[in-house]
Amino acid sequence: MRRNVVAMLIAVGIVGAASIAGAEDGVRVRAIDAYVSGFGGYSFPFNTDLKFQGFTVVSDLELDKSPSFGGKVGMWFTATRKRLGVDIGVEADVTNFNPDTPGTLELNATYFGIHVLARVPMGVTQALPNGRWFPYVGFGGGGQRVTFDAPGTTEGRHTAPAFQGLWGAKVFLTKHIAVFGEGKFTYAAHTLTFQDAFSTADFDLTVYALHGVGGLSVHF
């Protein structure tokens, strides 16, 4: 996954260099393009294994598809545009979804992380100095917090290091309002501690998920 993201970043830079070379001269671009975004869509978790003390107790465990939604706050830095052909950005992302197991284990997962991004502004004009639209890719990490509940046990919580890779495209409706579509891959390895009236047991569950989302951004 990391190699794929790096390859996309290189491709974005090549396309960007060609695009910016053809952009109109004299367009005034602000040094920082800040934004806030909200999004919603659907999550598609991969099947995974449930382990106890390193041994697989359930293999190829199915996790449910579910709505996926969240928000972002970020900024783009345009100083690299002429030299690299891309703008470089950084954003904070929060994404929530519910990768339950059918009929047994209820899971609510919230990813939170910081990402580094690259975009290629396309259709740059004086009225739209950041382009009419742009493709982008990014990667980063942070944490993922899950709450979990199974019949006969108390509700538990666990926070684990997490990774996200993403790719998408954004289209400006006006100079400050844009819509976007995005694909995201999230990963986190959790330890779930189940307790009942008599015992405690730890199970390991790795959650891999693809998210297809769309949303609205306001740029400042």
Image (tube, grey):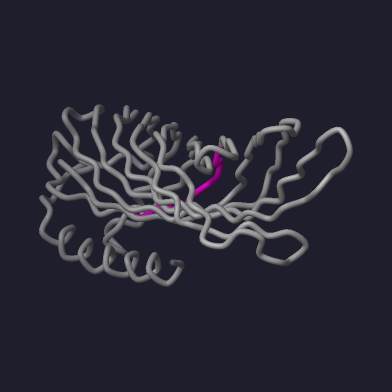
Q: Which residues are magenta?
A: 109-118
Residue at horizontal 15 percent and vertical 59 percent from the top: 19
Nearer to the camera, 93 or 29: 93
Picture layout, residue 102 above or below residue 20: above
Residue in the foreground of this view, choosing between 46 and 80: 46
**Residue at position x 80%, y 48% from top?**
201
Name the residue nearer the viewer: 203 or 33.
203
Q: Residue at x 50, y 41 (%)?
A: 102
**Considering the image in quadrants, where does the N terminus appear?**
bottom left
Residue 68: where, in percent of width, then height? 41, 36
Residue 45 on the magenta span? no
Taking the view exactly as shown, the residue that stands out farthest to the right is 198
Q: Position of residue 118 (x, y in %)?
A: 35, 55
Q: Nearer the viewer, residue 31 or 199?
A: 199
Q: Overall secondary structure of the magenta stretch? A: strand
Residue 101 locus on image (x, y percent): 53, 43
Quadrant where the image shows the C terminus: top left
Task: Name which residue lies at 46% across and 46% down.
Answer: 90
* For residue 194, side relative to residue 75 (left or right): right
Q: Left or right? Give the position of 151 relative to 62.
A: right
Instruction: Give how far across and how far down residue 128 sits, in percent.
Output: 17, 37
Count of numbered tags:
0
Q: Is residue 88 left or right of residue 55?
A: left
